[in-house]
Structure formats: structure tokens, C-alpha cells
Image (spheres, rainbow, N blue to C red):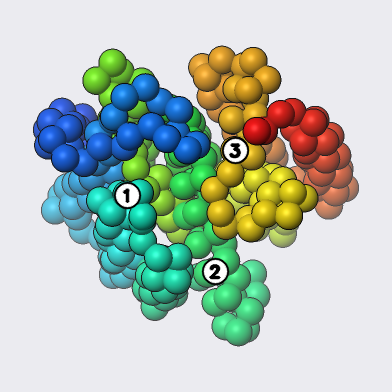
Amino acid sequence: MKPFVLYLLAGIVSCAVCAGVLPILRRVASRAFLDKPGGLKTHHGAVPVLGGCGIFLGLISGLVFIRLTTDFPTGTLHTLRGICLGGLLIFLLGLADDLNKPKGVNITLKLLVQLTAVAALIYYGIVIRAFPSPWVAWPLTFLWVAGLTNAFNLLDIMDGLCVSQGVICTLGLTFIALPGEYVYVNFAALSLLGACLAFWPNNHASKKIFLGDSGSTLIGFTVASLSIGTGYSGHTDWGFLAPLFILAVPLFDTAFVSLARLLKGKNPLKGSPDHIALRLKKAGWKPGTIVTAFAATGLLCNGCAWVLTRAGLPLVIGLFVLTGLSALILTFYLLKLPAD
């Protein structure tokens, strides 16, 4: 079969499996594993919280299906093992956090598990290659992957917000990666895309289910890992900067929340109502409008990422200057909005 057909099948299988298991997970979780309102959680009533299991099963099913129907090159299998092993560790860590609410998993243990998951990526050859020295590349890989893993977790503050960014980021990675030889990126991205598309409606339905930490962190980890593996510099030397735009929304959201907490003298690792989505909601924005605005911004940033993979130095500088000014103006605007 042609690669395009295989990519499509990976997404379809993942979507079908995720959609099929979510009703079962909802029934199981509704008996014991519920996310109750309180603190930053303003939803009405207790909501089942095992949606991340659907994302995980969908993602793995898509990859297993393709593995059984396709003869992968050895290198491709090698990298997929890294993503699957690291993703499994992140998923189990998030699941333990979900099942141990409200106390959760100790932050030190979280960082150790995330470090181990990134070490698995590095062992299987998934590492930032912009710097030849491992003493630079390895710490940067950990900061990038662990940072985005937690950034997507921070985004999971409103129905549809995290999973919609998962859809947009995987679409961006796929669009840029498809012309190249990075088939493991294509298969894994489309498998994750299928699972996210299947989950998204269930995050809004009357009988909804939440992603939980297991789902949000798995999406973040997978997207961050795949962003390292895609080739960006086929047309220009500056293409390696494209992931900054593909993942601009979760990166900016995390940076803003951390800055807002620091300006108040709070620990940036401690929960607070400083999230962009919560500020906009308090200012009168409707949740659907907020999710749409985040999605539109993500699509715009992904368009900039594509331009960056084909732009010369003057356009790259202009793009970063314009983006930096826009981010600065947006930051001042958001800081003026009420948070408490």
C-alpha cells in the first residue's frame, strides 16, 4: 500500500479504538475514579477521569496495527520503541496521579519518572541534534520534552482546550513531516491525531470524561518527542526553529502562568488561577470562544512554522520580531485581566 494510505489507516484505527473504549472507561470510572469540583476546578458535579486511557490505547493500537501490516526499516522501529517506552512511563505516572487525587504524586518522583522517560528517548536516538555535544543536547532534550509534557498538563484547565491543541500540533507536525523520510513521525503523529479526534467530542458531551493527567501529559510527551524527530531544514538552515512555532500556544501559556505567579511572589510550580483561559473566562469570555481563540492562534503559529522551514534570514528575523512584539502586547493585556 502507498504510504499515504498507511498513514490514514493508522489514524483511523487509533480513532476507532479510542472511540470504542471511552464509553467503557466512562462506566468504570464513574464508580470510583471521579474528578470532583474544588479549587481551580469549576466544573459541575463529579466527572470520570480515565480519558487518558482511551488516548493511550488508541495511540498504541494505531502503531501496533501499522507494525503488523508494514515492514519498517530497523531505524524506524528503534525510534518507535523509544516513543512507546517513554510514553508508557509518562502515561503510568499520570494515571497514578489521577488515581491518587487530590494528593497526587510527589513532584520529585514526577521529575524522576519524566527524566527516565526522556532518557529512553535519548537511548533510542531521539535527541535534539542542533548541538553536537551530548552535554548540551541531552539537557536541552530533557528541558524541551519535560517542559512540554507539563505544559500540556497546564492547558488541561477547560473542556477541549488541551486535546484541541494536541490535534493542531499533530496536524502541524504531520504537514511538515509528510514530504520527508521520517515515517515514524508520520505514523505516531497520525495515531495520536486519531485518538485526540475521537476523544474531543467526549470532553464536551453531557456524559463527559476528562483527559486526566494521564491523557494531557501523554499528549504533551508524544508531541514534544515527535517535534524532535521531524526534519525542518530541507529548504533553509533556520527550519530547526519551527517547533517553537508549532508548539507556541502551550509554550506561551506555560511561560505566562509562570510569570504571573512569580510577579505575585508565588511558587510557579504551585497551582493558581493565573491560567490564560481562566483569566479570559473571568473577563466574560465564553468557554467555547476561548477554545476557538486558542485553536485559531495555534493554526496561525503552525502556518508561521511552515513559512520558517522555507524562509531566508531576513524573513526569519522579521517573523521572530513580529511574534515577540505580539507576545509582549498579549502578555500585558492578559496581566491586566482579573485572576482571583
Find the distance from the CA under tag 2 to the CA under tag 3: 29 Å
Between the residue at mark 3 and the residue at mark 1, the CA separation in whole angstroms equals: 19 Å
Q: Is residue 74 above or below residue 132?
A: above
Residue 301 picture location, percent across and down: 65, 36
Q: Is residue 16 visible?
A: no
Q: Which mark is residue 273?
A: 3
Q: Earlier in the sequence, mark 3 or mark 1?
A: 1
In this figure, which residue is indicated by the disc labeled 2? 141
Badge 2 amino acid: Thr
> Is the residue 158 above or below the residue 84 in the image?
above
Looking at the image, which is closer to me, 176 or 207?
Answer: 207
Q: CA distance from mark 2 to mark 1?
A: 30 Å
Q: Position of residue 259 (x, y in %)?
A: 72, 50
Residue under the image location 51 percent in, 17 percent down: 288
Give the class, few, some or many, for how many residues have Cα within 10 Å of label 3's Cα (few <14, many ≥20): some
Quarter of the image for the C terminus: give it.
top right
Q: Nearer the viewer, mark 2 or mark 3?
A: 3
Compare marks 2 and 3 and give the one earlier in the sequence: 2
